[in-house]
Image: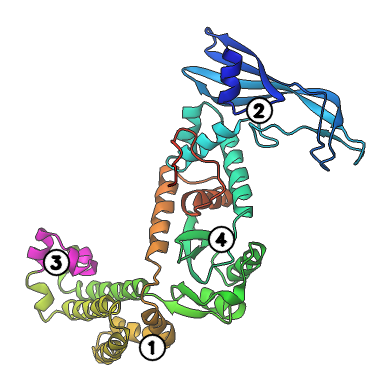
């Protein structure tokens, strides 16, 4: 009975069979011995049926724990001598990935945990090495991503995020319509866009089918998109424009703080969205935004820009007219950081207006993913290689549909 029970638990079907179960209480370990109960099988290499068994090779796999006992699966795997392809090939097993020493269920649990915690902590819980887990993550992410199709991708977002200390970055490309990561590569220069288009083609994607590219005002990304995605329109979303406005306000504040020292402790209040001020911040800013301070004037200009983007969701044409008026106001502000901001907006005018035309498209999701990746990197205290960081990025944000599901989660029954 116990052999039949474990046979069902492993999901085995004839001619696979659990022959013996050995429980060692002292070592807190259970061993399951599986056998192939047939004299032949189809060749794994060419598919020729009824090939004879050449010999057997002993193999072992770590499985999910059985209660408090560490579980291992053992099998003398048959090797087939194929008369069709003249090769000798080892039979594949249904409970493990080829070349792995862990069962698929174990690896599925490891992937689930690695998505939520540092790999080192995951390794301590599962009682295996960090390197073993990284091999599982790298292999499954590569296998799952190879099966992904990006044929329907038309709107993408491009951004970079820090990979390690110093000037080490990776470029991330997202499908904004489905909110998923579709490509990641080291660097943040124009060649990253070229590498994306090459990879995109291998996943049934057509670069000429991409309609809009949302990005920040990086010269490298702009040049890369112009060269390798010439048919796509570039859109600079409001997040990055308001971010530039915040930097301009802070530059005015820093300069004015040389004479008004109390401004040194008010930086984040000026940069924060007024609608999100706390009661304490509202008390502090009761009079300052309405004063004749240069910082207050810069802040009012910045908030007017934020209001334009907030209203653009309902009336893009009116927002375009409002932005033109705002541009004249900023150019006459006599505040050099604000005038530089106006110059930058004028230089990227077409891309900024494109974001108005497609106001539902923005890189807020991209920035949120960057925050998740940086939080994961911080919890892990950094990753050993850029490849590991990229694999973790896909595990967190790739929404890969071909990863093994969490074995401890009840399957959802679709109506």
Pick whichever of labels 4 and 3 is earlier in the sequence.
4
Contact, mark 3 vs mark 2 (Cβ under 8 Å): no
The image quarter containing residue 71 is top right
The relative height of residue 283 versus residue 59 in the rendered view (above or below) is: below
Q: Which residues are magenta?
A: 266-285
Point out the tag, 1 or 2, that comes first from the N-terminus: 2
Q: Residue at x 63, y 31 (%)?
A: 95
Which residue is the site of mark 3?
262
Residue under label 1, please give it: 346
Q: Residues within 10 Å of mark 1 (few under 14, many from 20)?
A: some
- Say whether residue 355 is left or right of residue 314: right
Instruction: Tell me, for residue 54, which label it has, or none.
Output: none
Residue under the point 55% across and 14% down: 29
Look at mark 4 in the image and give the residue it sits on: 183
Secondary structure type for disc 2: loop
**Where residue 297 sits: x, y (%)?**
18, 81
Q: Which comes sooner in the sequence, label 1 or label 3? A: 3
Where 295 falls versus 125 (above or below)?
Answer: below
Find numbered disc 3 in the image and state the secondary structure of the residue it sits on: helix
User: How many numbered marks does the figure carry?
Assistant: 4
């Amino acid at each position: 009975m116990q052999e039949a029970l474990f046979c069902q638990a492993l999901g085995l079907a004839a001619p696979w069979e659990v022959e013996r179960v050995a429980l060692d209480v002292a070592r807190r370990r259970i061993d399951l011995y599986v056998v192939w109960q047939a004299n032949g099988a189809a060749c794994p290499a060419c598919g020729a049926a009824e090939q004879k068994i050449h010999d057997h090779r002993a193999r072992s796999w770590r499985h999910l724990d059985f209660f408090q006992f560490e579980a291992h699966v053992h099998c003398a795997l048959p090797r087939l001598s194929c008369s069709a392809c003249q090769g000798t090939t080892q039979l594949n097993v249904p409970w493990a990935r080829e070349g792995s020493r862990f069962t698929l269920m174990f690896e599925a649990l490891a992937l689930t945990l690695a998505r939520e915690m540092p790999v080192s902590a995951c390794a301590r819980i599962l009682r295996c090495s960090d390197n073993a887990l990284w091999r599982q993550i790298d292999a499954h992410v590569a296998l799952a991503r190879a099966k992904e199709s990006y044929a329907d991708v038309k709107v993408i977002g491009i951004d970079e995020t820090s990979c390690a200390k110093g000037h080490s970055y990776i470029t991330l490309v997202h499908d904004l319509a489905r909110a998923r990561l579709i490509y990641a590569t080291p660097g943040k220069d124009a060649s990253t866009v070229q590498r994306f288009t090459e990879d995109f083609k291998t996943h049934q994607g057509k670069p000429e089918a991409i309609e809009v590219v949302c990005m920040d005002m990086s010269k490298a990304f702009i040049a890369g998109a112009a060269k390798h995605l010439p048919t796509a329109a570039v859109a600079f979303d409001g997040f990055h424009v308001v971010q530039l406005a915040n930097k301009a306000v802070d530059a005015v504040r820093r300069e004015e703080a040389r004479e008004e020292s109390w401004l040194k402790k008010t930086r984040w209040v000026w940069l924060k969205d007024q609608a999100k001020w706390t009661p304490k911040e509202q008390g502090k800013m009761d009079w300052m935004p309405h004063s004749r301070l240069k910082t207050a004037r810069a802040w009012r200009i910045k908030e007017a820009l934020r209001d334009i983007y907030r209203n653009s969701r309902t009336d893009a044409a009116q927002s375009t007219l409002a932005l033109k008026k705002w541009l004249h106001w900023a150019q006459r502000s006599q505040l050099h950081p604000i005038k530089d901001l106006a110059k930058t907006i004028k230089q990227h005018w077409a891309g900024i207006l494109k974001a108005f035309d497609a106001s539902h498209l923005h890189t807020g999701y991209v920035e949120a993913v960057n925050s998740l990746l940086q939080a994961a990197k911080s919890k892990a205290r950094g990753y050993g290689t850029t490849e590991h960081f990229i694999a973790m990025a896909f595990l967190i944000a790739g929404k890969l549909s071909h990863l093994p599901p969490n074995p401890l989660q009840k399957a959802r029954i679709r109506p």
